[in-house]
Image (tube, rainbow, N blue to C red):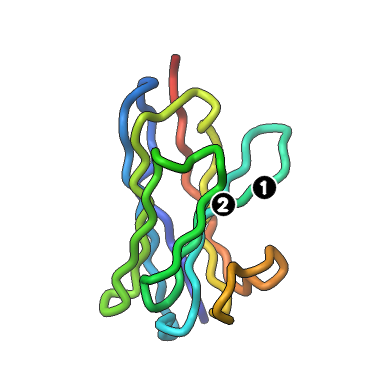
Amino acid sequence: QVQLVESGGGLVQAGGSLRLSCAASGRAFSNYAMGWFRQAPGKEREFVAVISWSYTNTYYADSVKGRFTISRDNAKNTVSLQMNSLKPEDTAVYYCAAAPWRYRRPRRDEYDYWGQGTQVTVSS
């Protein structure tokens, strides 16, 4: 059974920082891209960032570029999202997801595994 478990969410003031982590178990994800998505109340789930299995390729949504940084540790099967300069509009449930790495940014429908999500709330 594959599991992705997120942690690190919470309540933070605007301008603050949070670091989300995702631990993968059940299989090796070294040949998988690992990504983060988020879903705010009343909105569709949206892409945030993704990192290739080799660490060399990263993609970010325009709304988080320059503020968020994605990283991973294949030896530990973990992926992290460092979020700085948080804004109230970053408030959402954040989800970790995994997709086979095919040397390009994965499409949304290529993500095979999803975590349960962790809540991030940014107060103004």
Q: Which mark is residue 27?
A: none
Q: Position of residue 15 (x, y in %)?
A: 35, 23
* Residue 16 vertical position relative to residue 58 in the rendered view, above or below: above
Position of residue 45 measured from the top left corner of the image (x, y, whole percent): 67, 47
- Quarter where residue 71 is shown: bottom left
Label 1: which residue?
Answer: 45
Q: Secondary structure at mark 2?
A: strand
Q: Amino acid at mark 2?
A: Phe
Closer to us: 3 or 83: 83
- Residue 43: % across, % down: 72, 37
* Residue at x 44% of width, y 68% of height: 57
Q: Quadrant of the C terminus?
A: top left
Q: Is residue 44 above or below residue 29?
A: above
> How packed is label 2: few (under 14 Cα within 10 Å), some, or many (20 or more)?
many
Left or right relative to 120: residue 45: right
Residue at 45 percent of width and 62 percent of height: 58
Q: Secondary structure at mark 1?
A: loop
Graded by Cα atoms within 10 Å as few (under 14), some (14 to 19) or many (20 or more), the crowding at tag 1 reads some
Q: Position of residue 41 (x, y in %)?
A: 66, 33
Three-letter residue code for mark 1: Arg
Mark 2 or mark 1, which is nearer the start of the sequence? 2
Q: Tell me the quarter of the picture where residue 93 sits.
A: top right
Task: Please state if 102 lies on the left or on the right of 30 as rendered.
Answer: right
Q: Are marks 1 and 2 in contact (CB under 8 Å)?
A: yes
The circle drawn on residue 37 is 2
- In front: 67, or 6? 67
Q: Residue furthest top?
A: 124
